[in-house]
Image (cartoon, rainbow, N blue to C red):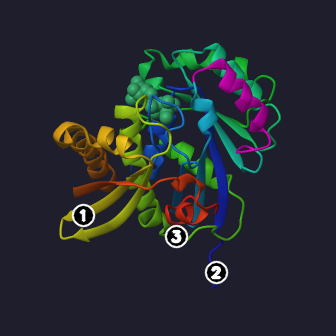
Amino acid sequence: MTDPVTRCGYVAIVGRPNVGKSTLLNYLLGQKLSITSRKPQTTRHQVMGILTESDTQIIFVDTPGIHKEQGKALNRYMNRAASSALADVDLVLFVVDRTRWTPEDDLVMRALEGVNAPVALVVNKIDMLDDKAALLPYSEARMVDDTFDAFLPISALRNDNLETLRQYLRNHMPVGPYFFPEDQITDRSSRFLAAELIREKIVRQLGDELPYTTAVEIESFEQDGHILHIGALIYVERSGQKAILIGEKGSRLRSIGTDARKDMEQAFETKVMLKLWVKVKSGWSDDDRALHSLGFEER
Ligand code: GDP
Ligand code: MG
């Protein structure tokens, strides 16, 4: 018997806000790994999801720039697109919403022009269509000039045609060894996700009040029976910020904790006990060693 052949590659999911990218990624990964927020730049890291199954590892890269709603940011994204996130991916999923094509979709499409990898047009929300035949003119118009490698109508929400999409993804991953351990999704990325969920709630609840200098460190992450115990430290730079974060009689911190815990319970499919502490760590963002211990080192 020969060793099984493995495949491994990078897939970028792009598209204007609200077309269903996160919904799709969450479905593919089977947990809530991608962070959604109405405020841009909630995540410092490029959010990555890794799916390993059927001798294939698919590494999903997010393109945060494209989630910004302003033209300027989108333009900047376009300029950088070819040289950054999209430069060395093996496949691009360009997600659009069947019910609405906007100028922003055109911008994204233009950003894809210089991309070498095959681009699949993923037409989402087909559950909103009464008549499936309405898809045909769409596909003809958009496929006619061979811009796209494939045309995949799906419903991320209703799980329609997603097996076809999975199969398509698998077939397009190059033969090669895995870049990440098979169980990557269960350890570092879970802690990472926990920290990101807390950061997300802080930005959502206090975005305008707190400067962009908050960091979250997961201190403990332990499953005990059916309860996952998570302890996290939130670092701020000044005691005034600490007071804001804690709120009157701890109300703000409690509310952040409750929101984060709910998302964690959904993501990890278990009951979660979340403990949050706030610490003042002056000038942490300038301290390389501090950055390292907080997980911001380049990988
Ligand atoms: P993103 O901004 O591209 O990441 O989009 P989201 O995944 O956050 O989805 C935006 C909205 O579209 C959410 O309210 C989703 O529930 C909804 N949505 C996503 N996929 C579908 C779908 O297949 N059908 C329908 N009807 N709604 C969807
Ligand atoms: Mg999203």
| Residue at x 43% of width, y 67% of height | 187
As drawn, which residue projects farthest toward the bottom?
1
Q: Could you say where residue 105 lies in the image, as x and y percent from the top left?
A: 64, 21
Q: Could you say where residue 240 lies in the image, as x and y percent from the top left?
A: 36, 41
Q: Quadrant of the C terminus?
A: bottom right
Is disc 3 placed on a helix, strand or loop?
A: loop
**Image quarter for residue 230?**
bottom left
Range drawn in magenta: 69-86
**Left or right of 122, for residue 53:** left
Whether disc 2's CB lies below 8 Å from ligand 1 is answered no
- Of the residues shown, which amino acid type is indicated by label 3? Glu
Is disc 1 placed on a helix, strand or loop?
A: strand
Is residue 230 visible to us here?
yes
Numbered tag placed on residue 3 in the rendering: 2
Numbered tag placed on residue 182 in the rendering: 3
- Of the residues shown, which amino acid type is indicated by label 2? Asp
**Left or right of 142, for residue 167:** left
Q: Are marks 3 and 2 in contact (CB under 8 Å)?
A: no
Lower position in the chain sequence, tag 3 or tag 1 = 3
Cα separation, mark 2 vs mark 1, equals 40 Å
Numbered tag placed on residue 229 in the rendering: 1
